[in-house]
Every structure is written in structure tokens, then in C-alpha cells.
Amino acid sequence: MLEFRYDTQLLIEGQDLDEDAVWEYFTTHFQGDCLLAVGGGDLIKIHFHTNEACKVLEYCATLGEIFDIVVEDMDRQARGLKG
């Protein structure tokens, strides 16, 4: 079994988005790895492996509109099933 089960990816569209602030929030409030928070201004791309995908989505929705949301179950993928 994987330490972090869900590959969580999304885009956040908003105003005055700060990738450093998002990075800081993720690293202090969520457990996970492979964090990618790229962008700024009005758009940030998020990629994160975690067991707390719902909490990640809830937080990101507070920053702006979230879209292109993908949450894949990497444990299922590792067993050859659809994620």
C-alpha cells in the first residue's frame, strides 16, 4: 500500500494568488508529497499526493474558482485497476 493514496491535481483561478503562500499552507496543514504549486497572479496549478484530497479541494476553493480537478487513486492504479 502507498503512503499517500490520492494524486490530486487542479487549477485555481482567482485574484492575487501567491504560489509561495499556497506552498506554505500545504506544507504546514496537509500530509503528502510531490507538491507542485506553480503560477501566481490569477492562476495556480496544483499537483499533490495525499490521503486528504477532500481537504485539499476545500482549501483551494477558498482561494478562487477550482477547475480541471483530477483525483486519482494511485493504490488502485498500482493494482492494475482504473484510478
Image: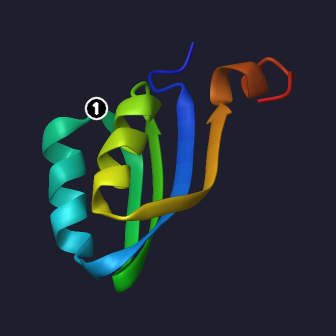
Q: Amino acid at mark 1?
A: Gln
Point out the image quarter for the C terminus. Answer: top right
Closer to the camera, 17 or 45? 17
Question: How far across and how far down the image is residue 76, in percent?
Answer: 74, 20
In the rendered picture of this protein, how many numbered marks are placed on residues? Answer: 1
Is residue 60 positioned above or below 8 on the image?
Answer: below
How many residues crowd around disc 1 within 10 Å: few (fewer than 14), some, or many (20 or more)?
Answer: some
Q: Quadrant of residue 37?
A: bottom left
Q: Which residue is labeled 1 in the image?
A: 31
Q: Is residue 34 left or right of residue 19?
A: right
Closer to the camera, 78 or 38? 38
SS at mark 1 in the image: loop
Is residue 1 positioned above or below 80 on the image?
Answer: above
Question: How far across and how far down the image is residue 15, in percent?
Answer: 29, 81
Colour mapping: rainbow
Point out the image quarter for the N terminus. Answer: top right
Q: Is residue 7 left or right of residue 82?
A: left
Is residue 1 positioned above or below 23 on the image?
Answer: above
Name the residue at 79% across, 17% down.
79
Closer to the camera, 39 or 59? 59
Is residue 62 positioned above or below 51 on the image?
Answer: below
Name the residue at 22% across, 76% down.
18
Question: How far across and how far down the image is residue 69, in percent?
Answer: 61, 51
Q: Quadrant of residue 67?
A: bottom right
Question: How far across and how far down the image is residue 50, in percent?
Answer: 42, 33
Q: Is residue 6 left or right of residue 15?
A: right
Name the residue at 38% across, 84% down.
42
